[in-house]
Structures are given as structure tokens and as C-alpha cells.
Image (cartoon, helix red, strand yellow):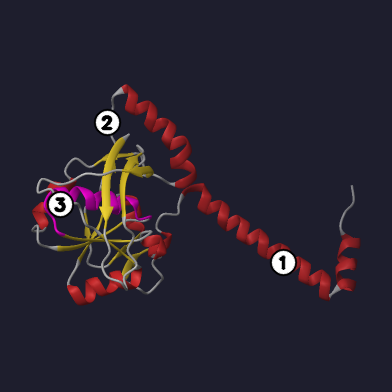
């Protein structure tokens, strides 16, 4: 478990930005699973300031203020759906280490979280900050995005400590972005990129069964005589 700290401050009286000091704890799957209050200052003694905005505000930052979009999700979610012309710098990467402890954890993960939720087995990307620095200067305006909003907040903290000054994140992540807000590409909508595994299959089966049951109920309600004849034809045990 690794602790990652971040904080945020208000943009303006009209901007929906939370004010908090948080320390995030990360799971080996790459999901940030817990947070608690934390306080810290950077080398200059200045508290970190990160803009947390709603999807429509994020769109304005990109189209009107020249923010570049940096997607910090893992490769699988990025491939499912992404904002066009974004930069992909994952905060977590697939863990292919072959020591005994990692093999055991990976096996357990793949049999549960991987199977049911489609989550890859990951570890922190040791080159994350350096990769961003190789592509952007410290004064660059960056909109960091992830699926739920927590990884982008953790990534913002790392970049703020590295000297980046103009960082924004979407509150609640891409799962909160309405279709059509951004030009996107991939095989699904941005808000659905985190859905995978047996949970998705189960959801589709449930939807089909629900439709069948509703149709059956309507048929019985509006055509009771025909329904009764069909039931008479059904084999009995």
C-alpha cells in the first residue's frame, strides 16, 4: 500500500471545486481504495493547489484556455475509450514481475477482480513523472483524467511536487462525463470505459431477462385469453 497526498483549492465563486487535504492509499490493482486527511508543503513552503472541475468546465479549459489532456488510466481502460488527441501516461502499469509474492497476488487478483471486474494487475509506474516532464514544461496547462477521479488526483499531487503549476482534474473522473462533451474514440463511451469482466456480461443478461419478463407481463395483461391457451399447451410434469 502506498500513500499519495493531494489537495485542492477553489477556482472561483462560480467553479465547483472542493477544498480538501487528502492522503490516498493505493491497491495493487491500481485502484485508490482509501483516503484520509493529510497536510504537507512543497519545497517552497506552498500548499499544493489543484483545480477540480465539472465536465463542462473541463471542456472550456481545453477549448478556451489551451489545457492539454493527459490520460493517466491503465492501458485497458484507455483502449476502450479515450478523448481524442490526449496524451497517455499511465499512473499504474501492468505488473509482470515474477517473484513468488507477486505471482501469488497476481493469481488471486486475476481469479477475482480480474475475472469479475476486468481489472488488470498493476503497480505504480516508476517513470510517470519523468514521462510527463519529457513531454511538457512545468508551466504547461494540464487536464489530468482517469475513470473515477482518484488516480488523476494522485497524479496531480506527484506533478505538483515536481514543479507543475497549472493542473486540473475532473471531479469524479470520466465516468461523470456526458456523451458528446469531448470528441472521443474507442469501442465504448468514456463513462463506460471502466466496465468490463463478468459484471458487464451479467448486466447484459439481466437486461435481456428483464425485457422478456416485461413483454410476458404485457402479453398476459392485454391478451389474457391467448395467454391462457398458451399455458394450456405447456407440458406439465
The x and y percentages for residue 115 are 47, 42
Q: Is residue 18 magenta?
A: no
Give residue 46's mark: 3
Query: Alpha-carbon distance for marks 2 and 1?
Result: 50 Å
Q: Is residue 149 left or right of residue 197?
A: left
Tell me the SS state at disc 2.
loop
Q: Is residue 104 visible?
A: yes
Q: Specify few, some or many for label 3: CA neighbours under 10 Å numbering under 14, 14-19, or 20 or more.
A: few
Seen as rendered, the residue at the extreme top is 100
In the image, which is nearer the foreground, mark 2 or mark 3?
3
The x and y percentages for residue 105 are 38, 29
Residue beneath label 1, please? 214
Viewer-closest of 190 and 226: 190
The x and y percentages for residue 10 are 27, 64
At x 15%, y 48%, the residue is 161
| Magenta stretch bounds | 148-165
Mark earlier in primary sequence (2, 3)? 3
Residue beneath label 2, please? 97
Q: Examine the rendered structure and indicate whether residue 74 appears above or below residue 174.
A: above
Tell me the SS state at disc 3.
loop
Query: Alpha-carbon distance for marks 3 and 1?
Result: 59 Å
Q: Is residue 236 left or right of residue 45?
A: right
At x 72%, y 66%, the residue is 214
Q: Specify few, some or many for label 1: CA neighbours under 10 Å numbering under 14, 14-19, or 20 or more.
A: few
At x 28%, y 24%, the residue is 99
Query: Alpha-carbon distance for marks 2 and 3?
Result: 38 Å
Amino acid at each position: 500500500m502506498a500513500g499519495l497526498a493531494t489537495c485542492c483549492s477553489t477556482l472561483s465563486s462560480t467553479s465547483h471545486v472542493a477544498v480538501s487535504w487528502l492522503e490516498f492509499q493505493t491497491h495493487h490493482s491500481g485502484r485508490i481504495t482509501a483516503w484520509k486527511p493529510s497536510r504537507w508543503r512543497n519545497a517552497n513552503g506552498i500548499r499544493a493547489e489543484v483545480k477540480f472541475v465539472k465536465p463542462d468546465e473541463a471542456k472550456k479549459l481545453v477549448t478556451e484556455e489551451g489545457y492539454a489532456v493527459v490520460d493517466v488510466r491503465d492501458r485497458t481502460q484507455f483502449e476502450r475509450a479515450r478523448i481524442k488527441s490526449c496524451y497517455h501516461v499511465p499512473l499504474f502499469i501492468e505488473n509482470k514481475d515474477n517473484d513468488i509474492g507477486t505471482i501469488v497476488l497476481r493469481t488471486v487478483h486475476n481469479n477475482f477482480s480480474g475475472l469479475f471486474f476486468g481489472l488488470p494487475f498493476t503497480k505504480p509506474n516508476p517513470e510517470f513523472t519523468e514521462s510527463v516532464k519529457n513531454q511538457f514544461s512545468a508551466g504547461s496547462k494540464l487536464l489530468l483524467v482517469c475513470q473515477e477521479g482518484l488516480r488523476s488526483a494522485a497524479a496531480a499531487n506527484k506533478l505538483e511536487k515536481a514543479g507543475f503549476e497549472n493542473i486540473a482534474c475532473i471531479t469524479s473522473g470520466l465516468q461523470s462525463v456526458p456523451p458528446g462533451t469531448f470528441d472521443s474514440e474507442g469501442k465504448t463511451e468514456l463513462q463506460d470505459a471502466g466496465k468490463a469482466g463478468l459484471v458487464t456480461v451479467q448486466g447484459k443478461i439481466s437486461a435481456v431477462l428483464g425485457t422478456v419478463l416485461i413483454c410476458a407481463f404485457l402479453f398476459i395483461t392485454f391478451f389474457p385469453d391467448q395467454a391462457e391457451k398458451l399455458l394450456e399447451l405447456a407440458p406439465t410434469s
